[in-house]
Amino acid sequence: MATTTFTGRSINPPPPGALPSLPMTPQTQTARPDSSALPSRPPRPIANTKPSLSLKQPSTTCVRPGAGKGPPKKHHMPAPPQQSKTLRKTTSVGAFPQPPKGPSRTNSNGPSPSSAAAASVASLPDGLPTNRRSSSTSLSVPNGDTTMRTRSASAKSRQSLLRSPHAMSTPETRTPSAQGSQSQSVDTPTNDGSGAHDAGQDSADKSSSETKGNVVVSVRVRPQAGTADDVNHGDWELDGRRGAITYSGKEGGQFVSDNVFTANDNNAKVYDSAAKRLVRRVMEGYHGTVFAYGMTGTGKTFSMQGTASSPGVIPLAITDIFSFIRETPQREFLLRVSYLEIYNEKINDLLSPPPPTGPGMQAVPQEEIKLREDSKRGVYATPLKEEIVQSPNQLLRVIARGDNSRRVAGTQFNARSSRSHAVVQIVVESRERVPGGSSLQENKRAATIVPGGVLVSTLSLIDLAGSERAADSKERRTEGAHINKSLLTLGTVIARLSESKGKEGAERDKHLPYRDSKLTRLLQPALSGNSLVSILCTISIGSTGSAANVSTHINETLNTLKFASRAKNSIVSHAKKAEEANAGGDAGSRALLDRYRNEIQELRKQLEAKTKEEASAKDAEEEKAREAEEKARHEEQMLELQLARTALKERIEHLNRLILSSKSFGVNNPSRSFSGMGSHYRNSVVSTNEGYAVSVRSSRASELTLEVPPHLNRTSSGGSALSLSLSSHSNGLVGEHGSEDNDSLGENGDGTASASAQIRALHADLADKNRYIITLEKRLLQARRSSQPRASILMANGGSDDGEGGVEAVLKEKDEEIAELRARLDDKDRMLNALRSAARKRDIADLKVDTSVERTRAQARRSAGSTSSSVYTRPSAAAMSPAYTLSPGSEKRMRNVEDATRTLNGMITERVEKKVSPVDAK
Ligand SMILES: Nc1ncnc2c1ncn2[C@@H]1O[C@H](COP(=O)(O)OP(=O)(O)OP(=O)(O)O)[C@@H](O)[C@H]1O
């Protein structure tokens, strides 16, 4: 059999519509329970309007049901044109669940029987289901006076198929419900094993069931206050089991739909039977639209929103959406929601209402929300706020927020009548976590997700405003006019859909007045076949008041039932999985899932780069810290060196003083030798027993002056004094064979230096030595400084960067420095030797002085009266030798000098080695 497909809008999302607010209890009903989870409406004033109930029908003729009532009468609803043989063959029967027959069906809450299945109850209005006459799937149409409907053999076989136990599943179990029994009738089989199609179903079945179950029409009867028995209300008879409503009054007939919910059926039952399957299909990638249609006060909002104790279609769908996500770990989902209303033919964003204006406050003009259409998105409202939601509660809160902004007002029939059509749109994006991945473990391990393959489907949940004929207030009348106009257009579209069955896509849409109202424009994708559709028609079959009111009420109810029948017979759905065509991972993809994935990857890259930057900054910091530590250590060592240098210097000074004092033979008479010296020198000079004072100048070309002790001068005849001057050479040392009588007469011209000259000489000598020491220390420090950084660099580089050449260069340099330092030490040694030699020479000179004094004394004795005393006794050679001539005291002094020199040498050598050794070690 052929099916009519609509190719023009295959990927379009379903249309938006107007959404519900919580229904208010009518004046005679108990108050609607408030719900924390559900939105609450602000109180509305009850308008003093007179009821006007008739729902204008767009059609002008209809076939009056004739079951048991004789031949159907021609009514004013238009009879759809005769269908071509290929048109809508698969629509009606597939869409209407087949009623199970026989005793096995025990649960009245089970799936509603199909009007097509039950030939005996097929009392459809004339002119509505003409298409059903064709082939096995069509509903039979009342035919003339006697034949109400016909059924082909294939319809019988399908009926028997639908009588399976699966089809009998009850909605109360909240498992596959009445719709679940039709699961195989969804047009497009799923290819991912997500449950759309039973494997093993033969291709013939697939073909015949392509569009079955995509359109479900249900009728819900609102309970009447104070009426216990809702089954029999005067001329009305309800058969929930068969899904039949029979009116036996004027213009009566039997109306059969997929589901009939009586007053005993609660919202859960309604959801299970009318919407649950559709919601699950939306999660699998199909567009879905659920809308409630009916006269004012009949329970549209109650059915869509429900109450806290009896949640309606919207909260139950939300719960199901998240259950599905939980049950589908192999896919990842992203949900976003928008909420709009059409009020007086103007679209308002309920999630972004205009800021309140008050006295003195300037109204902020809001950008007008317009309807646009493109090939990818179909018809959509823009600009419209969309919120991403991650939990059922969050989604409910968002919707409750929108409900608070929705227009409601009191009417005679409903204290909280919805004055606008409200449309909740939940966009579901989903994608396989790991394409081809089979196990959950695998999925968990796989961190990367390839772009693309995103399914983007939309669930539209629409609470239409109720029709009303007249109102007292102008505002209500204006609202009513707009509401009625849009509902009239909807009815017209539904009626004409059947007329354009032979046409497809744009050609068909051309003949349909979708653009006559915003509501039909928004519903266009759903009505034209791109969406699964569930229509819940609400009626109230009890009425009170005047006869006119009762009559109007009945007319409205009949019109609603006719609308249900036409909708069921006219809408053909060829909904396909809506894969985002542009979901190739590019930034322009409409699928947020892709865009977010890209963003996540981009951010991950940035994060990695930042982490690297941080690591290198940390390394640099550590390097700095190491350097600072090194510097601190170096400073510490410098301080140590300084201290050591000071100690060394003091020691050297002390030893210098020691040397000077030990060689001063004339210090026995301190008053003579140091009379002119400062206290420092007086104190520091060590006096020997002999009390000689010696002034030594060891600088270049310095002069070493040995001053004859005063007591010698005193003893010498004629007060003559002996002054011995030793000249040193370029090395500043006193040569062993230096001239003894050169320039040695002294400043006083008597062979003795003046005290100030001695002091100057001492100062100069001391300064020379200090300079030498300082130079020596500087060299040591320089050697250390230059060696440390290089050594540390070598160490930091693990000695590998510069290779052995660098180390060798450093070692060579150090060797040179050591050699230089050793040379200097040798200089020092030589200097000390020279000093020692000078000291020896002084001793010799002292000895000579002693000898001449003796001679002088002997001459004096001879001249004093001895006989021919001209005999000169030459002192023996032994007596002239230094060993001989040095007194024991002199020897001791010499040893002291040598000891001091050794100590000094040892200290210097030790310091030098200490300073050199760390460098060597490095
Ligand atoms: N099946 C039901 N069971 C109990 N109460 C119901 C039922 N249907 C409707 N009601 C009550 O009837 C009143 C009107 O219902 P509701 O507001 O849902 O009507 P409506 O069709 O949305 O009206 P309108 O088109 O004016 O907005 C509410 O107080 C609601 O609680």
Image (cartoon, grey):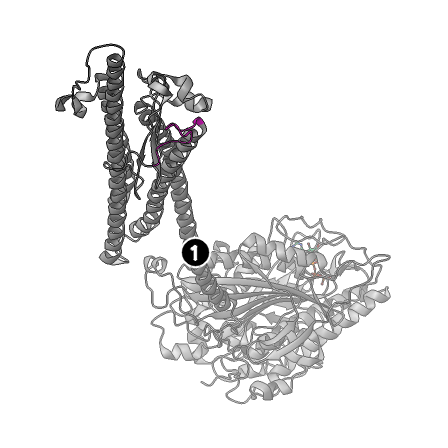
Residue 454 position (above or below residue 893): below
Query: Residue 334: horizontal and vertical position, in percent?
Result: 51, 62
Query: Residue 67: horizontal and vertical position, in percent?
Result: 60, 73
Query: Residue 506: horizontal and vertical position, in percent?
Result: 59, 86
Q: Is residue 922 visible?
A: no
Q: Based on the displayed image, in which of its 4 quarters is residue 825 positioned?
A: top left
Picture residue at 30% right of the left edge, 25% below the top? 663
| Quarter of the rendered structure image containing ligand 1 | bottom right
Residue 744 is inside the magenta segment:
yes
Residue type, mark 1 in image: Thr
Helix, strand or loop under label 1: helix
Residue 629 position (above or below residue 759): below
Number of dots carrying numbers: 1
State the residue position of label 1.
Answer: 611
| Residue at the front extreme, as displayed | 868
Q: In this view, does 690 lie to the left or right of 244?
A: left
Asked whether mark 1 and ligand 1 are closer than 8 Å, the reply comes as: no
Q: Is residue 141 left or right of residue 885?
A: right
Picture residue at 62% right of the left edge, 57% below the top? 398
Of 124 and 301, nearer the camera is: 301
Of 550 and 540, nearer the camera is: 540
> Crowdedness of circle 1 by 10 Å Cα count: few (<14), some, many (20+)?
few
Picture residue at 33% right of the left edge, 57% below the top? 441
Picture residue at 74% right of the left edge, 67% below the top? 366
Q: In this view, does 375 lie to the left or right of 182?
A: right
User: Does the magenta stretch mainly form a helix, a strand or a loop?
Assistant: loop
Q: Can residue 515 be seen in this view?
A: yes
Residue 635 position (above or below residue 156): above
Residue 231 is inside the magenta segment:
no
Query: Residue 598: horizontal and vertical position, in percent?
Result: 47, 67
Of 583 and 690, nearer the camera is: 690
**Magenta range:** 743-755
